Image (spheres, grey):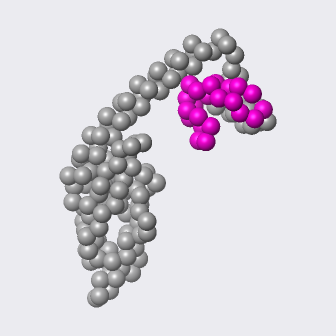
Amino acid sequence: MKVLLRSDVKGVGRRGDIVEVKSGYARNYLLPTGAALLANDAMKDQASMMRKSRDLRDQKDRESAEAQRSVIEGLRLTIEQRASSNGRLFGSVTEADIVNAIRTAANISLNRHQIKMTEHLKEVGPATVEAELFDGVVATVQLEVVTK
């Protein structure tokens, strides 16, 4: 069944795309939630308008993310945690801690899911993590973990 997506649907498509989906998925989820409309030949103009507005919004969001990246990469964050005498933290520095540090230092609100770490920081010292601000826009965050 062909549908016109009214919003981004993960794994299916983005707003303004005309996609082919299983009829049960369309009837039971996409259409009742308003995420899609049944597609017909007359909707091609509407789909192109939706894609155009999506592209304009994405361009604005990308520019905003580029500006945020330049601010974040200029920061040197310091996070205080309790640690043992040999430098091992009693807890760990998580994505939420890094988001809070960025919010207080630069007044930039991020989601903790935007911070990419292989594992939480568990020792005192310098560290580098990445923050994905937008698709393809990644900021490198320099931080120093110190004892309280």
What percent of the width, then of the height, locates residue 81? 32, 74
Residue 123 within the segment the image draws in magenta: no
Query: In the displayed image of the protein, which residue is found farthest to the bottom?
Result: 85
Query: In the displayed image of the protein, which residue is found farthest to the top?
Result: 42
Residue 11 within the segment the image draws in magenta: yes
Q: Which residues are magenta?
A: 1-23
Quadrant housing residue 83: bottom left
What percent of the width, then of the height, locates residue 63? 31, 34
Q: In this view of the protein, can residue 148 be seen by the observer?
A: no
Query: In the displayed image of the protein, which residue is found farthest to the right?
Result: 24
Q: Residue at x 37, y 76 (%)?
A: 122
Q: Residue at x 26, y 51 (%)?
A: 72
- Is 13 positioned to the left or the right of 3 in the image? left
- Is 41 positioned to the left or the right of 7 in the image? right
Quadrant housing residue 70: top left
What percent of the width, then of the height, locates residue 113? 46, 54
The kind of secondary structure the magenta stretch mainly shows is loop
In this view, 125 is above or below 37? below
In this view, 114 is above or below 10? below
Camera-side residue of 16 and 89: 16
In this view, 85 is above or below 26? below
Quadrant that contains the N terminus: top right
Quadrant that contains the C terminus: bottom left
Q: Residue at x 28, y 88 (%)?
A: 85
Quadrant housing residue 56: top left
